[in-house]
Image (cartoon, rainbow, N blue to C red):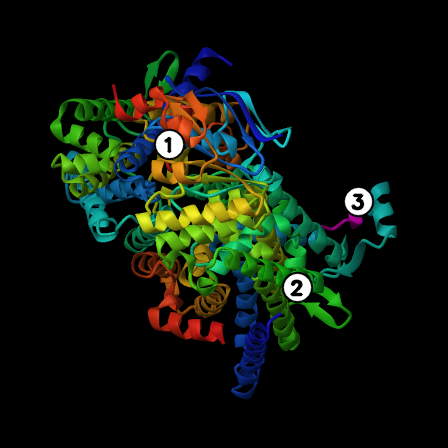
């Protein structure tokens, strides 16, 4: 393999990988505050992309994206308020089924609103054919957009959790909900906020990748599975490890094509990896086994 | 079997016969096709109910087991071995002399040589059981979200495999699957003049499967399963090998799914990738949840009702959305299932004491 | 001969040495209690013996046979029954059914027998039911047989739990804080039941917080503190042991 081809695959892997990482972080944010895996996480990505495409008919691109993110955040908040907030300590099984139901409803509504055609946002800069050469690989400027925006989100998020009081309150809820409540933190609002935050993350990711991967009403399930794989790979709840795990999965997928692995089975890689990791190290590659034992899976 | 259980089963038989007679009298025999398909789905659903309601394990991959059964039987009974035989392949010749193969002609008069349906069926079901066993050993160690995702992942892999492999017909699936002659004169196929017979074949399978499961939940094993579901560590302390019981239940329900898959495939003459889809698995879970999880009767009732309505096209293009909505509503407002309303419970309680 | 022999058992949780080289024996037919202040490692010790936690090192022998490393269900099948601190009744099951689950190791019917409802399994089922009823009789709770176990009062549930644990005819019964959550009357009742169980020839090892219960019924007591074996002896000896008094009353 030439160096050019090698870096080509690396960039492709990183692009997809960072999207998986964003979905995984979305999972983690909600998981940390509620203990719930939100099976509708992939649908946030789809909603972000699709609404932005619709807004883009009337608004300039940046404005359309902002509106799409806000709309998705609103939907995230509504979902939490309507379906999650008022349940008194529901069982895990119940929550799994509810969020699966939600993902189906969102997907079907998307099908009825937008149809089953494949759409895409325009390239943020340049167009389909424009490319930049880095390390011998010619890559679309959109790839740089994806990398820049997603990295920025990850950095902002870690700053948010470290330095803002809201972020700290959310972390307090994650660590011990009852204690946080006793300290005067409104845990319920924190949960709503976590849904909004992870919806927003998903929506942004959905917008930046739309030019490259296109958007379709049923793209959520695949993304959710891969995002979950990444979240588990990094250790459920650990967002920074999820970034590393996401890049790992993206690069593995990219090189599987390079070595002639059939494209049709590409999804199977992620899922096999997920099953493998669940069987061998359910606390994740970077997780702590003893600590994981204490969590309720 | 207690008299109570026997009379309930007798009622079920009477109901099944009644439905057929009604369609006959009212001249709506065309309903029988969808009813038969519904019955086969119910066979899968009661198996899933055992896993979810009694062993307490969620499975979002049961359409996968259905598909393994259906696809393998379909592939074996449609793959033409004649060219290989004529090409002089010695092992095909050997198999041919053992009577495992059967000859027929295609719609275009081309001579076909394929695996005998009984053999195909047995292979399909045993292979499904084996896969369920192998996948179950690691998967059932997981709980909650992890179990849900792992079974979902398994379902997606099966979906991808049937979608990507030529032998399984890729996106078109497999069609022209021949009928399955169970006994001379009893053939599972979609011929219109065979409709009533097929309805009763399906009903016989469902009722026997249902009776087996009813017995099971009332037995020592059923008690152990309920104990595992209720308090796993306490069950463990009673000397119950919880992992083994969960695994066997999982395999048993996979066998139910595979049998349903084989029979439905031969009945409808084909199988397509959508039968292996995630939405199908979710739908089965939805029906079990609506029936009240730990209620075989509930699963059967709801499976019959909702599958039939869906097959009749009542929900139109909102078919999947309806099931999604039902899932949410049930889990929000009646996590014990719609048949577990207070009044009903009281009535049932009195009956059980009598 | 000692029925249970715990030798130099160790368990760490990170930096915490929860069980630190504990050794003791339980003689057949006696009631032995393990006591100690909060965090002494009693529950950990208990979980190590019944297989719920893996030990770091040491041995546990039951009737001369090493049991460390066996899974909980294997230990149960080997003849050690246990109860839980927070009484784990099986939900949706009557008291009688709970006890019937306890008879699991005393019966065989498997999946096929269950599904086909074979005559042999029908006979076995009848036997299970009769035996379960006898156990309820032994613990004087037949009046609750058909009541859902979880809806009973705590003390009654404890009695059902004892019946359930005794169902497998265990030579050794482990009780995890049998008086937890009970009032003084119920505690006295539980004490009486434990003595009754002992009279059946069953050896009892209990972990308990409540000193009054332990002093009344135990033949021997082991005192743990910070994971270490501090003292061992008859209730009288323990009551007069200076070190034990210091642990309980502070410096």
Question: Residue A42, percent across and down?
Answer: 33, 41
Residue at image point 45% right, 16% down: A6
Both marks 2 and 3 on one chain? no
Distance in Å between CA atoms under marks 1 and 2: 42 Å
Mark 2–mark 3 CB contact (< 8 Å)? no
Q: Nearer the viewer, residue A103 or C57?
A: C57
Q: Write down the residue under mark 3.
A: B84
Q: Write down the residue under mark 1.
A: A294
What main secondary structure does the magenta stretch of the protein show? loop
Say which chain tag 3 marks: B
Q: Nearer the viewer, residue B147 or A179?
A: A179
Q: Which residues are magenta?
A: B79-83
Q: Is residue C125 left or right of residue A218?
A: right
Q: Is residue B41 left or right of residue A74?
A: right
Picture quadrant of residue A288: top left
Question: Residue B283, percent across and down?
Answer: 44, 57
Question: Residue C204, percent across and down?
Answer: 51, 39
Find residue C122 and name its label.
2
Q: Is B184 in the magenta?
A: no
Residue at image point 50% right, 32% down: A269
Mark 1–mark 2 CB contact (< 8 Å)? no
């Amino acid at each position: 393999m030439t160096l050019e081809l090698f870096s080509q695959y690396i960039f492709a892997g990183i692009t997809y990988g960072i999207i998986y990482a964003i979905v995984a972080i979305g999972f983690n944010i909600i998981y940390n505050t509620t203990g719930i895996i939100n099976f509708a996480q992939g649908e946030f990505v789809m909603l972000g992309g699709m609404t932005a495409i619709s807004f883009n008919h009337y608004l300039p691109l940046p404005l359309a994206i902002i509106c799409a993110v806000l709309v998705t955040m609103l939907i995230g908040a509504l979902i939490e308020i309507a379906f999650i907030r008022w349940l008194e300590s529901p069982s895990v099984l119940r929550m799994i089924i509810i969020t699966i139901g939600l993902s189906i409803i969102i997907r079907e509504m998307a099908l009825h609103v937008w149809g089953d055609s494949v759409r895409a946002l325009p390239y943020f800069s340049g167009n389909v054919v424009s490319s930049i050469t880095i390390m011998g690989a010619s890559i679309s400027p959109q790839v740089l957009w994806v990398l820049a925006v997603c990295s920025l989100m990850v950095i902002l998020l870690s700053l948010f959790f470290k330095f803002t009081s809201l972020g700290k309150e959310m972390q307090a809820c994650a660590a011990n909900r009852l204690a946080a409540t006793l300290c005067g933190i409104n845990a319920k609002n924190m949960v709503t906020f976590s849904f909004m935050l992870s919806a927003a993350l998903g929506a942004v990711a959905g917008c930046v990748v739309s030019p490259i991967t296109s958007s379709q009403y049923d793209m959520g399930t695949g993304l959710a599975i891969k995002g979950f794989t990444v979240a588990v790979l990094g250790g459920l709840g650990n967002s920074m490890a999820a970034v590393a795990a996401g890049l790992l999965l993206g690069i593995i997928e990219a090189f599987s094509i390079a070595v002639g692995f059939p494209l049709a089975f590409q999804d199977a890689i992620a899922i096999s990896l997920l099953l493998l990791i669940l069987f061998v190290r359910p606390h994740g590659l970077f997780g702590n086994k003893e600590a994981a034992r204490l969590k309720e899976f | 079997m207690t008299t109570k259980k026997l009379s309930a089963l007798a009622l079920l038989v009477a109901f099944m016969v009644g439905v057929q007679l009604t369609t006959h009298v009212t001249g709506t025999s065309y309903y029988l096709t969808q009813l038969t398909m519904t019955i086969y789905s119910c066979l899968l659903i009661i198996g899933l109910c055992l896993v979810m309601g009694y062993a307490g394990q969620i499975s979002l991959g049961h359409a996968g087991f259905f598909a393994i059964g259906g696809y393998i039987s379909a592939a074996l009974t449609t793959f033409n071995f004649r060219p290989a035989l004529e090409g002089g392949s010695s092992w095909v010749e050997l198999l041919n002399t053992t009577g495992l193969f059967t000859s027929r002609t295609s719609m275009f008069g081309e001579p076909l040589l394929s695996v005998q349906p009984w053999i195909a069926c047995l292979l399909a079901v045993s292979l499904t059981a084996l896969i369920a066993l192998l996948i179950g050993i690691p998967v059932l160690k997981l709980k909650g979200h992890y179990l849900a995702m792992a079974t979902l992942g398994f379902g997606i892999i099966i979906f991808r495999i049937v979608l990507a492999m030529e032998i399984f017909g890729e996106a078109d699936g497999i069609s022209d699957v021949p009928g399955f002659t169970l006994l001379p004169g009893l053939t599972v196929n979609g011929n219109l003049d065979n409709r009533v017979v097929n309805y009763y074949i399906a009903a016989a399978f469902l009722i026997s499967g249902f009776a087996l499961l009813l017995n099971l939940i009332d037995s020592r094993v059923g008690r152990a399963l309920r104990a595992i579901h209720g308090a796993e560590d306490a069950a463990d302390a009673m000397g119950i090998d919880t992992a083994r019981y969960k695994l066997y239940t999982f395999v048993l329900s996979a066998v139910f799914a595979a049998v349903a898959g084989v029979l439905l495939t031969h009945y409808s003459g084909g199988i397509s990738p959508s039968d292996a889809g995630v939405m199908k698995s979710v739908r089965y879970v939805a029906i079990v949840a609506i029936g009240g999880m730990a209620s075989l009767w509930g699963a059967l009732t709801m499976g019959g009702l909702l599958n039939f309505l869906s097959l009749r096209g009542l929900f139109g293009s909102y078919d999947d959305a309806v099931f999604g909505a039902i899932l949410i509503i049930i889990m929000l407002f009646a996590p014990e299932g719609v048949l577990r309303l207070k009044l009903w419970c009281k009535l049932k309680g009195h009956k059980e004491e009598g | 001969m000692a029925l249970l022999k715990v030798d130099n058992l160790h368990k760490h949780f990170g930096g915490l040495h929860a069980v630190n080289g504990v050794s003791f024996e339980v003689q057949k037919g006696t009631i032995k209690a393990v006591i100690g202040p909060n965090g002494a490692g009693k529950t950990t010790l208990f979980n190590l013996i019944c297989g719920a936690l893996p030990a770091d090192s040491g041995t546990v022998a039951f009737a001369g046979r090493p049991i460390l490393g066996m899974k909980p269900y294997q230990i149960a099948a080997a003849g050690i029954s246990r109860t839980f601190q927070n009484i784990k009744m099986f939900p949706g099951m009557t008291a009688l059914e709970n006890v019937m689950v306890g008879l699991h190791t005393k019966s065989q019917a498997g999946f096929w027998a269950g599904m086909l409802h074979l005559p042999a399994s029908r006979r076995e089922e009848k036997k299970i039911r009769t035996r379960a009823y006898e156990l309820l009789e032994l613990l004087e709770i037949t009046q609750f047989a058909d009541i859902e176990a979880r809806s009973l009062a705590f003390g009654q549930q404890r009695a059902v739990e004892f019946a359930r644990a005794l169902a497998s005819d265990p030579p050794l019964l482990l009780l995890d804080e049998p008086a937890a959550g009970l009032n003084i009357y119920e505690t006295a009742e539980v004490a009486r039941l434990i003595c009754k169980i002992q009279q059946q020839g069953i050896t009892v090892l209990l972990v308990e917080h409540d000193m009054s219960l332990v002093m009344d019924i135990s033949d021997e007591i082991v005192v743990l503190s910070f994971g270490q074996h501090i003292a061992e002896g008859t209730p009288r000896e323990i009551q007069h042991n200076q070190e034990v008094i210091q642990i309980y009353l502070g410096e």
